[in-house]
Image: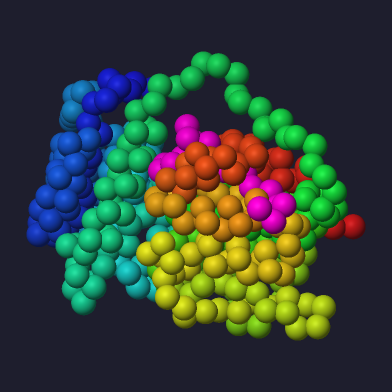
């Protein structure tokens, strides 16, 4: 695969049937000197033509693809775009609706790398600061991964894990918490594919996503052949072998009822500008299980999870983090790693394989 020179701006194509949207998106992207818009097209067919006609040094590396367009829509164009060489990164842009969430997950299954939900006018539209920050982080992060030279070295093995005292890993572990944000859906899928169907302990996932999108994410992850995955419901028991995903716009906590632990959904204030957030979930797990919690922090912007992982480490629990090389944005895992809290770092694939070995299966 050919790559851009190190440090060169990421080349971006905008594919949206609205000229107004293309203009607004271009203005946002061009505020970052690390990005350069090289093409603006109105449908999937034009996107294919633009890729085929562009000389290699002008060919888009990242395509921001609208899903609802005339002539050729995004879902029709997506597999055709991914057949081009060198293969571009495709980030889909979808409406912040249930229909948009369903389409987004279909696109991720079909090979899109990520998504950006476009806010409606009531939410500030394309000028919404949170949307602008998310757009820039995802386009630049995926673009930088795309530009990295393909390594000819042998694949990196799974982390070599230190022996851990009983009560931290293996039979002593009582719960697993995975936190992620920017680039998270693909990282989560890579990790969960490597977990056994009958995982010996329960797991919770906190992925920064809007309401409506998390149900589709859970459905997507549930079909990967690993443990059963569902969006958490109020009062749902935390059971071995099952994964609960925090619903969009709700914090996921636990409450004790006899010898059971049940999901408690909270409308408490955002933490680290996020709801759901990783930190309140980790605090709740520590209160329930003490040191017998294992946390994995995957790719994401910001530092959500840092305070929770620090508290978990002080309680005697275990923290792992995704490595910088494989992260779209090394914000969340980087904060944990720089604080010296991550016992191990690795790709989502390596972390998943190691978890499968350490935590194991139910009988």
Residue ID at (44%, 52%): 303
The x, y position of residue 272, in whole percent, is 41, 62
- Residue furthest out toward the right: 363
- Note whether 337 is above or below 307 in the view shown: above
Q: Which residues are magenta?
A: 314-330
The x, y position of residue 274, in whole percent, is 41, 65
Residue 266 magenta: no
The x, y position of residue 203, in whole percent, is 68, 61
- Note whether 2 is above or below 339 in the view shown: above
Horizontal arrangement in the rendering, residue 289 relative to residue 77 (left or right): right
Residue ID at (72%, 52%): 316
Q: Nearer the viewer, residue 41 or 237?
A: 237
The x, y position of residue 301, in whole percent, is 39, 50
- Residue furthest out toward the top: 152
Quadrant into which the N terminus falls = top left
Residue ID at (24%, 26%): 8
Asked if residue 270 can be seen in this view, the reply is yes
- Residue furthest out toward the front: 314
Q: Nearer the viewer, residue 335 or 326?
A: 335
The quarter holding residue 165 reads top right
Residue 320 magenta: yes
Residue ID at (68%, 69%): 287
């Amino acid at each position: 695969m050919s790559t851009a020179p190190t440090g060169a701006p990421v080349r971006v194509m905008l594919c949206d049937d609205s000229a107004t949207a293309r203009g607004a998106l271009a203005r946002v992207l061009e505020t970052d000197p690390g990005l350069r818009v090289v093409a603006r097209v109105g449908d999937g067919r034009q996107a294919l033509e633009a890729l085929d006609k562009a000389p290699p040094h002008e060919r888009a590396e990242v395509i921001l693809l609208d899903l609802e367009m005339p002539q050729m829509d995004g879902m029709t164009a997506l597999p055709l775009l991914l057949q081009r060489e060198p293969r571009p990164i495709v980030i889909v842009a979808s409406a912040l609706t249930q229909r948009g969430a369903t389409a987004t997950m279909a696109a991720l299954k079909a090979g899109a790398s990520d998504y950006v939900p476009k806010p409606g006018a009531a939410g500030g539209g394309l000028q919404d600061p949170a949307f602008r920050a998310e757009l820039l982080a995802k386009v630049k992060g995926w673009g930088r991964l795309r530009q990295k030279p393909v390594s000819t070295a042998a694949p990196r093995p799974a982390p070599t894990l230190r022996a851990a005292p009983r009560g931290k890993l293996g039979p002593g572990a009582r719960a697993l918490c995975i936190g992620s944000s920017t680039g998270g859906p693909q990282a989560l899928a890579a990790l969960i594919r490597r977990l056994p169907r009958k995982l010996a302990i329960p797991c919770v996932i906190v992925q920064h996503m809007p309401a409506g999108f998390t149900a589709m994410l859970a459905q997507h992850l549930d079909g990967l052949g690993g443990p059963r995955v569902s969006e958490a419901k109020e009062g749902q028991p935390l059971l071995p072998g099952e994964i609960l995903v925090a619903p969009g716009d709700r914090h996921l906590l636990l409450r004790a009822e006899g010898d059971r632990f049940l999901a408690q959904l909270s409308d408490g204030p955002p933490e680290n500008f996020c709801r759901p957030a990783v930190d309140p979930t980790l605090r709740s797990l520590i209160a329930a299980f003490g040191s017998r919690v294992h946390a994995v922090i995957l790719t994401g912007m910001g530092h959500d999870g840092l305070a929770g992982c620090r508290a978990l480490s002080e309680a005697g629990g275990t923290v792992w983090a995704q490595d910088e090389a494989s992260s779209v944005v090394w914000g969340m895992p980087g904060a944990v790693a720089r604080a010296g809290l991550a016992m191990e770092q690795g790709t989502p694939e390596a972390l998943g394989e190691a978890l499968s070995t350490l935590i194991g299966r139910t009988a």
